[in-house]
Amino acid sequence: MTALPTSTNKKLGLVIDLDVCVGCHACVVNCKEWNTGGYGAPLSDEDPYGGNPTGAWLNRIHTFEVTPEDAPASIVHFPKSCLHCDDAPCVTVCPTGASYKRSEDGIVLVDEDKCIGCGLCAWSCPYGAREMDPVEQVMKKCTLCVDRIYNENLEEIDRTPACVRTCPANARHFGDFADPNSDVSIMTRERGGIDLMPEMGTNPVNKYLPPRPKVRPDQAPALTAPVVKAEGGLLGWVDKMLEAL
Amino acid sequence: MHPAVSVIFFTVMSGAGFGLMAMLGLGLPLPAEPVFAFMICVVAAGLAVAGLISSTFHLGHPERAWRAFSQWRSSWLSREGVLSVVTLLVFALYGANWVFNGERHLVLGLVLAALALLTIFATAMIYAQLKTVPSWNTWLTPLCYVAFGLASGLLLATAFTTGNKEALGKVTAGLIILAWCAKYMWWKRADNVGFSDTNSDVGTATGLGTIGSVKLLERPHTGENYLTKEMIHQIGRKHAQKLRMISKVLGGLVPAIIAALVWITGAPTILLVLAFLSMVAGLFAERWLFFAEAKHAVSLYY
């Protein structure tokens, strides 16, 4: 059914900390690696070792340059995957019922056996979160690693999405936004987490933490105060002797 | 957006086919011979069905297309599928009654016309519903689709009419001009809308706009991907102004002049078949631009 659930018991999603991401693309690679062998058809590539490789990825990192009016530019690495929107347009436009949002945890998924590959869901998504698999010709998207997070065959520490588990900088966090005391809810509150393109009315679940204000180089305190004079002891004696030379 | 030939063919041809069905249903005066009735019904259904079949060519899995009839409660694409099949079924009844009994049933015809109109409207809503493509996201989009569908259908029907040439010539020329007026308004809006309808820019897309001006430094990958190929289509925009002129001349000027000639000089109506072919060619150019010129919100990330 492509109607959206009126509410979901849990709101599972990610917090992405733009202050911390170093742009290493480890989450991109681990996402591809897990999902090419996990839920649904493999994530294929075309011409992977040739001159013009393309393929389906569920998580991509863009890099932006932000220039404040009165400060030097800074670089922000920007990971982007499905935001598992509460009002997901990709679900309601689907003509076959392949695209759906789960009422139990809010994860947006594609039933690949029902997908006709029309691409309308990708057109309706402002974030570019969905990509057609070039070989299977079905729509692929982030599953929030639905085959990891409930998987009791894995160690408990591994029951998080692959991107979160692999991030060496801890820039990605996974949790339940319906619980006001979850880590992700607290982080979002304390750091002023934001929605991407709120004007599109999608009500994304995933939140982005904006970079913390940078200290400007010309206003930064000096790292060490110049040593004017050493008092007493061996250093004092050396100081006195060298001054005398 | 990527202008897929199958979708351009689908929207123009099935628009004309359903437009012609609407005109038949409204009781446009036509020869009473069963052979003619059969022929014109085959043409109308043929245009609509050819368009619908063509639309499945851009699907990744056309063999599952039947599933698209299930989600009419939420999806315009599904509604379009259901409406087109219902309209074709009603048209089959109307056509059979006409061919075998020589009767053009008034009520059935009106129902048929309404359904045909709704089908074209649903086709347009597939695009008009998308907030992510601001130039499509307007009531002018369904207005243009319906007006072009009806105008091209009327043009083809009038070519064979037994009714008052002068009156029908006037109505046909008038409808073609009205349709292009709607398209003129659509283009005027599309040229100015950008992303201003939603106030989206790279700042809101990244949420970094509150800090300063934002510009892309590096794309996620060095090559193209599905998103850049499908939604950040560039090539079609290069010749946009020339294509607009071609579409206006072939799709509007030529058919309107031929229709006016028929009404003023009383020339044989069969000339309108030429006008129809010219209009279809013009509409192909118009529909190509509808896709190629449309900018998608995801381009803010690239």
Image (spheres, rainbow, N blue to C red):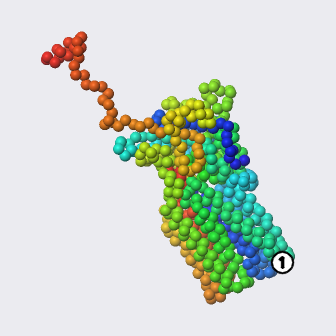
Which residue has dot 1 on it? B102
Q: Position of residue B146 (x, y in %)?
A: 65, 68
Chain letter behind tag 1: B
Q: Position of residue A30 (x, y in %)?
A: 57, 34
Residue A101 quadrant: top right
Q: Residue at (68%, 65%) from the top-left corner?
A: B120
Q: Residues within 10 Å of mark 1 (few under 14, many from 20)?
A: some
User: In the displayed structure, would residue B76 be above or below residue B98?
Assistant: above
Q: Residue at (61%, 78%) from the top-left corner?
A: B174
Work out whether residue A18 can be spotted.
yes
Name the residue type under label 1.
Gly
In the current view of this chain or complex, which residue is farthest to the bottom?
B265
Q: Residue at (49%, 35%) from the top-left corner?
A: A191
Q: Residue at (58%, 49%) from the top-left corner?
A: A201
Q: Nearer the viewer, residue B256 or A138?
A: B256
Q: Nearer the viewer, residue B238 or A72?
A: A72
In the current view of this chain or complex, which residue is farthest to the top?
A233
Q: Secondary structure at mark 1?
A: loop
